[in-house]
Image: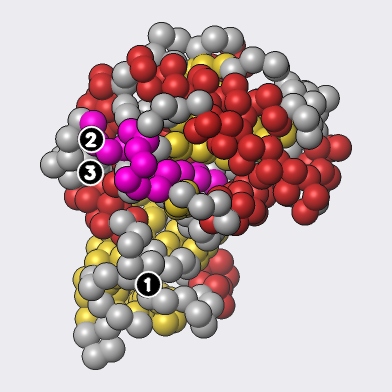
Amino acid sequence: MSSSKPNYLRRRLLQGAAATWLLSVSGIGIAASVASVVAVRVWPSSTYTRVTLESTIPLKYKQFALSNPNRLVIDIENVNLNSVLKAVSAQVPNNDPYLKLARVGQHDPNTVRLVLELKQNINPNLFTLKPVAEFKNRLVVDLYPANGGSSEPDDPLLALLKEYNQGDLEKDRPSASPQAGKVGRDRPLVIMLDPGHGGEDPGAIGKRGTKEKNIVLQIARRLRTLIQKESGMKVYMTRNEDVFIPLKVRVAKARAQKADLFISIHADAFTDRSANGSSVFALSTKGATSSAAKYLAQTQNESDQIGGVSKSGDRYLDHTIFDLVQTATINSSLKFGKDVLTRMGRVNELHKNKIEQAGFAVLKAPDIPSILIETAFISNLEEERKLKTAKFQQQIAESVFAGIKAYFATIKY
């Protein structure tokens, strides 16, 4: 008896400890299944408005629409209302063309309800994104106008975005546009400027907090002004505001406008802050010309993951267009790039004095000579300072414009 009692007590103690352990594990499991929203961002633009909820784990949601007034209601499961969510109402600017106001509340113990009151009929596009770069899990809510937008009448961007979201981008377009890239006297020369990044995707960020997306937009606007003053030329921009545009849509817009040249404008970044100078890149279908070019192409091609796109339409460049890239177009890109690089070298030190090549997704139009310009290293303290100045921005714009004119001067009509 005396020997069995300690064993009995020992079993009871072990059972109690096991029960306590199971309870603690269950508690941890329950806590881990509840999402915490760590950031809410609103990105208004004339094309569409984006609302992003960033969370510790993927968000599960349901959506439905209400009228009088028009509202989009999103019920988010397994999340608790916190100060971050409550602050969403303060992030909606009065001049947002699509979103009137946002409010949030704890709908039931396990559900937060986000209500977006709208200024007009919209087509919502909701999707989730896995963690990438500095971002955690994201729920993205894109609000597109149902009956056209406030973009310029001749701007096909909204229609292209609609096609992209439906997975129909370039579905009915020819593999090569008969007019694109074919210069003639019967029409103006068309240049498409592509300020990199935008919206949710800031691009590279300098030590002083300078964002690449803002700098390259300023340079592109300066270059646009120069081109607009030149007779016989027309200019368009893939974006003219702080909005995210998928890489494939940028290329599709250039093709829709029958562009003769495509110029993507960026500001380099590297782990070594001593790296400096301007660079020009063209497409390669046979691998990168250097490890640095390969690295840069990989980081630029991640823009869609960082900016946030749904998976629909991804086959556009990865298969159809990539297979149709023409050697002649790449050769023209290399010639054009050399004309630009030579003139950029007169206003800034060159990182390399030759055109480099890599598999940049944004350069993959089969029928448009295309280059990607790295204006300077935003990660370099001195060049970050220069990039912020109107003088240097104008110098870069003028050097690229001189390269454009030099290239077209050699084209036989």
Residue 200, how many percent across, how many down?
51, 52
Residue 24's disc number:
none
Q: Is residue 383 above or below residue 357?
A: below
Residue 169's disc number:
3
Q: Amino acid at mark 3?
A: Leu
Which residue corresponds to the image point at 53% horizontal and 31% vertical from the top-left? 409
Residue 150's disc number:
1
**Badge 1: residue crowd in 10 Å (few <14, some 14–19, many ≥20):** some
As measured in the structure, the alpha-carbon distance from the residue carrying label 2 to the one carrying label 1 is 30 Å
Which residue corresponds to the image point at 31% horizontal and 21% vertical from the top-left? 325
Residue 357 seen by the camera: yes
* Secondary structure state at the residue bearing disc 1: loop
Nearest to N terminus: mark 1 or mark 3: 1
Q: Amino acid at mark 1?
A: Ser
Q: Along the horizontal axis of the image, is 256 left or right of 267?
A: left
Nearest to N terminus: mark 3 or mark 2: 3
Q: Which residues are magenta?
A: 176-195
Q: Which residue position holds label 2?
A: 178
